[in-house]
Image: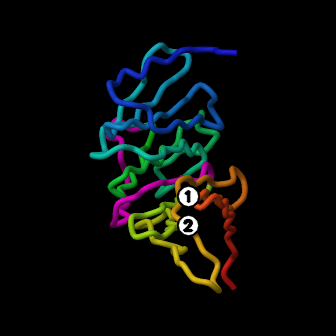
């Protein structure tokens, strides 16, 4: 059942969507022209347009409970918080929804990204990069790389084929990667001892 039509207000294609888990009226959309637009389903147009990427946006995620550097709001703040968005040039932007100045943090992965996933709650993102590795980054601090899973071929080793899609489990620290060799790999995170 369709509930509302939201005109994009853009000439470019919609590349990704994210709905707020706390405020169901908020929808974020990433576009091929590098913009991220925030919509309120109760209004017929976009509420805010962020023009902070210079290449197509691969993924965006509204993280309502994210509190990065004291700037993001918690769920008690009326559903406001942070949009984490990433583009094909490897640039990640953290956008404070309450601020017209938009970006309060930028992270560079350092190489072109083919596909990207942002965890809906945890401060994590995963990127399949042009050097054929799956890089897991934190959105805390300078966005350090926490882990890398590399593509390799070999008779005895487990092989990770070129990845075409990534998605995080909504509640657990697990990521699924779909590859062009018809495999789905699920990776989990362990606490360091």
- Element carrying mark 2: loop
> In front here: 48 or 110?
110
> In front here: 171 or 185?
185
Where is mark 2, residue-wise?
161
Image check: 42 left or right of 30? Answer: right
From the top left corner, tell me how far across and down residue 107 is, in percent: 37, 60
From the top left corner, tell me how far across and down residue 160 is, in percent: 58, 70
Q: Give the range drawn in magenta.
A: 99-121
From the top left corner, tell me how far across and down residue 116 is, in percent: 49, 54
Identify whether 127 is placed above or below 43.
below
- Categorize mark 2 by other alpha carbons within 10 Å: few (<14), some (14-19), many (20+): many
Image check: 147 left or right of 86? Answer: right
Where is mark 1, residue-wise?
180
> Which residue shows up at 46% across the image and 58% down it?
69
Q: Which mark is residue 109?
A: none
Place residue 112 in its image quadrant.
Answer: bottom left
Which quadrant of the rendered structure holds the N terminus? top right
- Element carrying mark 1: loop
- Categorize mark 1 by other alpha carbons within 10 Å: few (<14), some (14-19), many (20+): few
> Which residue shows up at 65% across the image and 36% down it?
22
Identify whether 84 is placed above or below 138.
above
Nearest to N terminus: mark 1 or mark 2: 2
Residue 47 included in the magenta stretch of the image: no
Distance from disc 1 to disc 2, alpha carbons, whole Å, reads 6 Å
From the top left corner, tell me how far across and down residue 83 is, in percent: 48, 44
Place residue 173 in its image quadrant.
Answer: bottom right
- Asked if disc 1 and disc 2 are in contact, CB closer than 8 Å, the reply is yes
């Amino acid at each position: 059942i369709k509930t509302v039509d939201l005109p994009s207000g853009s000439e470019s294609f919609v590349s990704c969507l994210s709905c707020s888990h706390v405020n169901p009226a908020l929808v974020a959309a990433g576009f091929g022209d590098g913009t991220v637009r925030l919509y309120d389903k109760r209004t017929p147009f976009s509420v805010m347009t962020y023009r902070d990427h210079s290449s197509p946006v691969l993924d965006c995620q509204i993280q309502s409970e994210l509190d990065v550097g004291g700037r993001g709001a918690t769920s008690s703040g009326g559903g406001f918080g942070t949009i984490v968005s990433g583009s094909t040039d490897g640039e990640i932007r953290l956008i404070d929804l309450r601020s017209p100045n938009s970006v309060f943090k930028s992270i560079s992965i350092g190489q072109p990204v083919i596909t990207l996933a942002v965890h809906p709650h945890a401060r994590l993102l995963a990127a399949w990069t042009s050097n054929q590795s799956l890089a897991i980054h934190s959105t805390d601090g300078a966005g350090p790389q926490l882990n890398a899973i590399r593509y390799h071929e070999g008779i005895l080793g487990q092989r990770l084929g070129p990845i075409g899609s990534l998605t995080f489990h909504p509640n657990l620290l697990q990521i699924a990667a779909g590859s062009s060799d018809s495999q789905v790999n699920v990776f989990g995170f362990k606490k360091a001892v």
